[in-house]
Image (cartoon, rainbow, N blue to C red):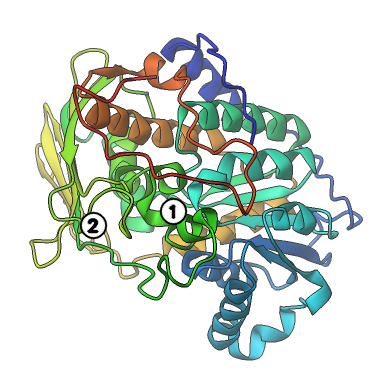
């Protein structure tokens, strides 16, 4: 990946303007390279799938359930065994609907360039569900190829990646292509209902925000280690979660969902700055070992214009209290909610409790609404929203790693490019040391 690594002198004000433009009305002409008049309900859409792990398998399943005239046409992954296991899992999930998986061996692509082969295979829509370090490169290639995009969160792991995605979002708007994100709580009925209440003034003026993501240690990839992987690159990609260049650390890869709640409450206005602490307290082993170089806990304090503060806490500790929750404090009341449950309560002047009879599955809804928008000739492009949240998470990691207060402009214009240069299978790829606040520099 070679995103622009030079400073762009972007400001928070510029970012707000870009967000408004990207979120504006889109043209009504949809161009499909291989399907004539594909906005019509009767036209088949060919889907490519890049990144055949667990979340990717879920996305492929949801895509095929979202539209009755969609078929999976091509798949790609760096590793052949991931394709085999992904398709097998998808077959078990889909049962009789598996007939819409039309992926013969000649359209199963492996290697570092598998994504490009999928894009060149005659597809109309692509699902990008690899590890996040690859996301900017894949989004850029997909938009340049004229494909509608579903991209799992997060969208990048560093400043150059963010800037690359911003340019891709603009180009997608010009081409009238869908870019839909995997921030699944944004697509869930209870959350949509309560945040609409907040935006309509149920809490009055917002004074403070809180979100948490307390979970287990996420012990992934037990079968892969240095003895059964051939190169540095294979080993790190097999265990991608534990390396900052691939995952962004867990505050960017996982807890970004909780940070997204802070941004959502603030109508996606970017924070001015963040101070964050974190560390590696219970993650086993030293840097360079099987558990890489990421932290296992973070505590962030965001500041918005006007004095609003947002507090986010996340950790990955086994056998400890777990919670994924959020609170919004306003002059007229307080919202208290818990992700994945029906507990969404507003107390104060405008008391309210969500009591719907169906907790809509955001994982499915994001695909349902993407295909409906494509069929209607008005493809969703919520790219600036998704990159906004991504950068907010990245700046928290930067603040924790360096010990500095990081402003929005500092994070957006950062020169730190984590993606390896001239990536190839046999390259030497030493593991970066665990960051030490006060010693690790901001770049």
Look at mark 1 in the image and give the residue it sits on.
187
Q: Residues within 10 Å of mark 2 (few under 14, many from 20)?
A: some
Q: Residue furthest top?
A: 9
Q: Is residue 197 left or right of residue 29?
A: left
| Front residue (pair 56, 369) | 56
Give the residue displayed 88% in from the left and 58% down from the top. Answer: 35
Measure the C-alpha gap from mark 1 to mark 2.
16 Å
In the image, residue 254 sits, relative to residue 86, either above or below, namely: above
**Location of residue 310 by image quarter:** top left
**Location of residue 404 by image quarter:** top left
- Residue 187 is situated, as x and y percent measured from the top left of the image, at 44, 53
Give the residue displayed 57% in from the left and 21% down from the top. Answer: 5
Give the residue displayed 59% in from the left and 84% down from the top. Answer: 88
Element type at mark 1: helix
- Residue 273 is situated, as x and y percent measured from the top left of the image, at 27, 19
In the rendered image, which quarter contains the N terminus? Answer: top right
Residue 61 is labelled as none
- Residue 110 is situated, as x and y percent measured from the top left of the image, at 70, 65
Look at mark 2 in the image and give the residue it sits on.
354
Q: Nearer the viewer, mark 1 or mark 2?
A: 1
Q: Is residue 443 left or right of residue 339?
A: right
Observer able to see residue 204: no
| Front residue (pair 293, 18) | 293
Observer able to see residue 46: yes
Element type at mark 2: loop
| Front residue (pair 213, 269) | 213
């Amino acid at each position: 990946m070679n995103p622009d690594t030079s400073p762009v002198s972007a400001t928070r004000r510029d970012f707000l303007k870009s967000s408004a433009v990207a979120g504006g009305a889109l043209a009504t002409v949809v161009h499909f390279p291989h399907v004539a008049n594909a906005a019509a309900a009767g036209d088949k859409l060919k889907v490519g799938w890049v990144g055949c792990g667990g979340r990717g398998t879920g996305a492929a399943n949801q895509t095929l359930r979202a539209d009755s005239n969609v078929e999976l046409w091509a798949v790609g992954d760096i590793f052949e065994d991931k394709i085999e296991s992904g398709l097998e899992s998808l077959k078990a999930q889909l049962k009789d609907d598996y007939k819409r998986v039309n992926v013969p061996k000649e359209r199963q692509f492996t290697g570092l360039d598998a994504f490009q082969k999928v894009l060149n295979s005659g597809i109309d829509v692509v699902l990008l569900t690899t590890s996040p370090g690859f996301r900017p490169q894949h989004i850029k290639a997909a938009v340049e190829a004229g494909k509608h995009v579903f991209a799992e969160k997060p969208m990048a792991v560093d400043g150059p990646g963010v800037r690359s995605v911003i340019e891709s979002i603009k180009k997608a708007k010009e081409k009238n292509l869908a870019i839909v994100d995997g921030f699944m709580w944004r697509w869930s009925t209870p959350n949509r209902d309560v945040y609409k209440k907040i935006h309509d003034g149920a809490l009055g003026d917002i004074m403070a925000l809180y979100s948490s993501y307390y979970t287990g240690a996420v012990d992934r990839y037990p079968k892969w280690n240095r003895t059964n992987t051939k190169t540095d690159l294979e080993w790190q990609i097999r265990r991608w979660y534990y390396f900052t260049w691939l995952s962004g650390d867990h505050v960017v890869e996982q807890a970004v969902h909780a940070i997204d709640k802070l941004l959502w409450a603030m109508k996606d206005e970017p924070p001015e700055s963040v101070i964050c602490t974190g560390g590696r307290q219970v993650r086993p082993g030293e840097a360079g070992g099987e558990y890489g170089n990421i932290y296992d806990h973070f505590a962030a304090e965001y500041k918005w214009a006007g004095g609003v503060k947002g507090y986010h806490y996340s950790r990955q500790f086994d056998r400890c209290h777990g919670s994924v929750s959020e609170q919004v404090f306003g002059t007229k009341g307080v919202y208290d909610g818990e992700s994945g449950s029906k507990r969404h309560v507003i107390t104060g002047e405008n008391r309210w409790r969500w009591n719907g009879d169906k907790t809509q599955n955001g994982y499915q809804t994001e695909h349902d609404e993407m295909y409906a928008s494509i069929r209607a000739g008005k493809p969703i492009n919520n790219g600036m929203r998704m990159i906004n949240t991504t950068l907010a998470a990245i700046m928290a990691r930067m603040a924790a790693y360096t010990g500095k207060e990081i402003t929005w402009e500092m994070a957006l214009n950062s020169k730190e490019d984590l993606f390896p240069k001239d990536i190839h299978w046999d390259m030497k790829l030493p593991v970066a040391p665990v960051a030490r606040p006060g010693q690790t520099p901001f770049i």
